[in-house]
Amino acid sequence: MSLVGIALAVAAVPAARQVAAAVTEQVVTSPQTGLAINGIDPVTYFTDSQPLAGRPEFEYRHQGVIWRFRNDGNKAAFARSPEVYTPRHGGYDPVAIARGIAVAGNPLVWIVSRQRLYLFYSSAARAQFAANPDTIAAAAEARWPTVSATLTQ
């Protein structure tokens, strides 16, 4: 199994906004801006192997929230295939989901595994997932329907 793009790009988002996110929505959003995954362009995890901030002029509404992109190409790619680029479980930490709770993932603590983007609350959770991605991903998948039912639509 190959893990691609394990990185922490702390410069991409101001420190005060790194972890702050709503844990009542189906998609992790910033309570200050209402943006999905703190305004990070989800396509850049795949194309640039790092999280990069999107721009206000390239916004797209999906799953009831606004997503930002760095350019029209990334916005178009996401619009064509949001299931490819949307963080798994709406950006909630799969390690926590596997335990039955919703904890917002930090867009700067991430892994792409089996062509899916996962966000984590902490580096320790990311390391735990990286050590056993198939087992944790399967446990999170099994628990996600129950956990997501506790979130607002």
Image (cartoon, rainbow, N blue to C red):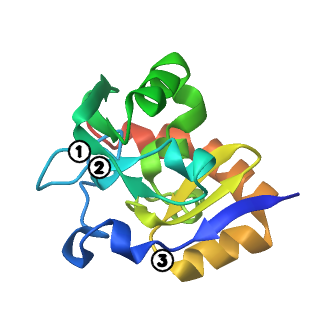
What separation in Å lies between label 3 and label 2 (alpha carbons)?
19 Å
Residue at figure coordinates x 45%, y 54% from the top left: 92
Q: Amino acid at mark 2?
A: Gly
Do the residues under discs 3 and 1 have CB atoms within 8 angstroms?
A: no
Asked if 13 appears above or below 10 in the picture, the reply is: above
How far apart marks 3 and 1 lie (CA) works out to 20 Å
Location of residue 23 in the rendering, given as x and y in whole percent from the top left corner: 29, 54
Mark 2 closeness class: few <14, some 14–19, many ≥20 residues within 10 Å: many
Q: Secondary structure at mark 1?
A: loop
Residue 17 relative to residue 37: left or right? left
Q: Name the residue furthest top.
A: 80
Please, what secondary structure does the residue beneath circle 2 have? helix
Q: Where does label 1 land, which residue?
A: 35
Residue that numbered label 3 is attached to: 122
Report whether 134 appears left or right of 8.
right
Q: Is residue 148 above or below residue 139?
A: above
Q: Which residue is mark 2?
A: 39
Q: Secondary structure at mark 3?
A: loop
Front position in the image: 23 or 18? 18
Q: How many marks?
A: 3
Q: Amino acid at mark 3?
A: Ser
Residue at 50% x, 60% y: name it: 93
Query: 88 and 42: which one is in front?
Result: 42
Name the image quarter holding the C terminus: top left
Disc with the residue nearer the chain's start (3 vs 2): 2
Q: Is residue 70 visible?
A: yes
